[in-house]
Amino acid sequence: MKGLNPCGIIIFGASGDLAHIKIFPALYNLWDEGFFPDNFFITGFARTKMDDEQFRKTIYDSMNIYCRKRPIDVKHFKDFSKHINYLSMSYNDIKSYESLKTFTETKSKEYGMPKNLIFYLSTPPSVYQDVVEGLNNSGLASNKEQKDGFSRIVIEKPFGYDYESANELNSDILSAFQERQIYRIDHYLGKETVQNILAFRFANAIFEPVWNNKYIDHIQISALESIGVGSRAGYFDNAGIIRDMMQNHMLQLLSLVAIEPPAIFDADDLSNEKAKLLKSVRRLTINDVRNNVVRGQYDRGTIGDNEEALSYREEKGIPVDSITDTYVALKLYIDNYRWAGVPFYIRSGKRIKEHKTEIAIYFKKLPHSLFGKNSVENLEQNIITITIQPNEGIELKIGAKSPGFKMEIEPVELSFFYKSSFKGTPPEAYERLLYDIMEGDQTLFYRTDNMLISWKLIGDIINGWKSLPAPMFPNYESGSWGPKEADELINKDGRAWHNEI
Ligand code: NDP
Ligand code: BG6
């Protein structure tokens, strides 16, 4: 990666979790690896009263817990933190934005740099509109990439609550910023293995010819977590897994595994292909929602050997009668030439037995077996597994002759693991995304049309649920693989979830 342009990064909601856990550690790592120029500044903007030194201390403390390069050397951090300031301001007061404008102008002059500004909205979504208005009214959101600098806005997820609210929020942002200034974050797109899906498919000649309904039986996409709702009860209980994971991360994974090759790897071409793909996903009717979507909520249980977990309804801040989904499994079809007839099984849940995010591509069974004892039925299918986490890599399951005098076939794996092939750790998702924002590269961010189509697809499910009877929650034990209905969803098609042991 090359060195970055001088810029000022303003983080709204800088007193919060995301700033401390993800954004600052990522900025520090980029700085530590020498990507930042000498002239840059980072400004925290939030209501909590703190001075610069107090703010820097909160950042230092959290970096020692969350930064991949911990422990952090105090003297080294001091060099970094000279670039950090904090403004205690109000989100809905124009004077705050006028002061911010003066502040950024002073800083830009002090550093002798163009007015390159990045506004990172790391607040709850209820604050987005105020910030966008403040930036617009104060002139901080200059409507174009000007000669004397740029303005870019970064929006965290969730981007809206449903199609209508997402559309409204988008229009508000578009009244102040142009599409090429907007960076909608889906941190999954910053993960190395997620980017590697495209490399695997399009940088190798051997996979693309079989990447279609002639050879592929079905595809499974799973994002399973052993953690529960944690401290995010207020947010999560309004969202559920359907909005928290499915609308964004899971549909983005689906897009990458199923899109047509873009002409080149750039933001526009990739977004065009993703939009085409998402438009081809078959919309779900109420019957599909009844038969092909399973929702679950976790009960008490044991995670690992001895972590006793509360049920979702017992978690702090969750209503005792909550019907929010902490697990969703569904079956989708993509109605296009490449994928006609291939089911995509997608699932995501919290408090599941194992933490793993993976895509498993199941190839069709052999038409005929030469090996007497190994009938077509008991020869395992070829499976490509792309593991996004925790053990990033790609495996291909093949049949091989087992040693001995008989011709017997056993499944074995051809494997590539990041850790062994590329020594060292890859940059974290937020490092990659922040680097790209500073570079002005939108390839790993999602465009308006992609975001809105995703909401339409997820809206079919949410609306379907409204007219179906309320589920009997809780319906799966913490530490299990999810509700039994999810097994039935895939078992009734003569298939099973990948690697449940
Ligand atoms: P927080 O709840 O910690 O909020 C961040 C800051 O926003 C707070 O410290 C607070 O600062 C300010 N704030 C302004 N208005 C409110 C309000 N009504 N209620 C609470 N805080 C308010 O959020 P996170 O840092 O966890 O997340 C920021 C954004 O990133 C959210 O949109 C979230 O959905 C998203 N996100 C978070 C992830 C995470 O792991 N935390 C993961 C993925 C996305 P002050 O009072 O000082 O102004
Ligand atoms: C976030 C969701 O976007 O992704 C969380 O809000 C979830 O609920 C998290 O835990 C998972 O991210 P990762 O990178 O740990 O897979």
Image (cartoon, rainbow, N blue to C red):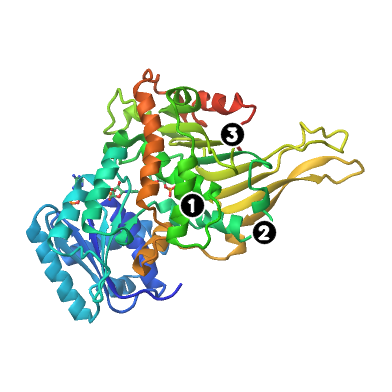
Q: Which residue extends farthest left? A: 95
Specify the amino acid type for callout 3.
Trp
Residue at mark 1 = 273
Residue under label 3: 497
Circle 1 crowding by C-alpha within 10 Å: few under 14, some 14–19, many from 20:
many
Figure check: 203 above or below 497: below
Query: For the residue with label 3, is its CB less than 8 Å from the closest atom of ligand 2?
Result: no
Cα distance, mark 1 to mark 3? 28 Å
Give the answer, above or below, for where 365 lies relative to 111. Answer: above
Q: Nearer the viewer, mark 3 or mark 2?
A: 2
Question: Left or right: where does residue 485 sit relative to residue 56?
Answer: right
In-front residue for pair 61/418? 418
Is residue 50 something that shows in the picture? no
CB under 8 Å between callouts 1 and 3? no
Q: Residue furthest right?
A: 405
Residue drawn at x 36%, y 44% as measured from the top left: 452
Element on which disc 1 rests = helix
First in sequence: mark 1 vs mark 3:
1
Q: Are marks 1 and 2 in contact (CB under 8 Å)?
A: no
Cα separation, mark 3 vs mark 2, equals: 29 Å
Residue type beneath disc 1: Glu
Residue 232 place in picture, x, y as percent: 30, 41
Callouts 3 and 2 close, C-beta under 8 Å: no
Q: Which residue does the image show at 88% across and 41% down from the upper left?
A: 407
Q: Give the amino acid at mark 2.
A: Ala
Per the image, label 3 sits on a secondary structure element best described as loop
Q: Which residue is mark 2?
A: 205
Left or right position of 244 against 419: left
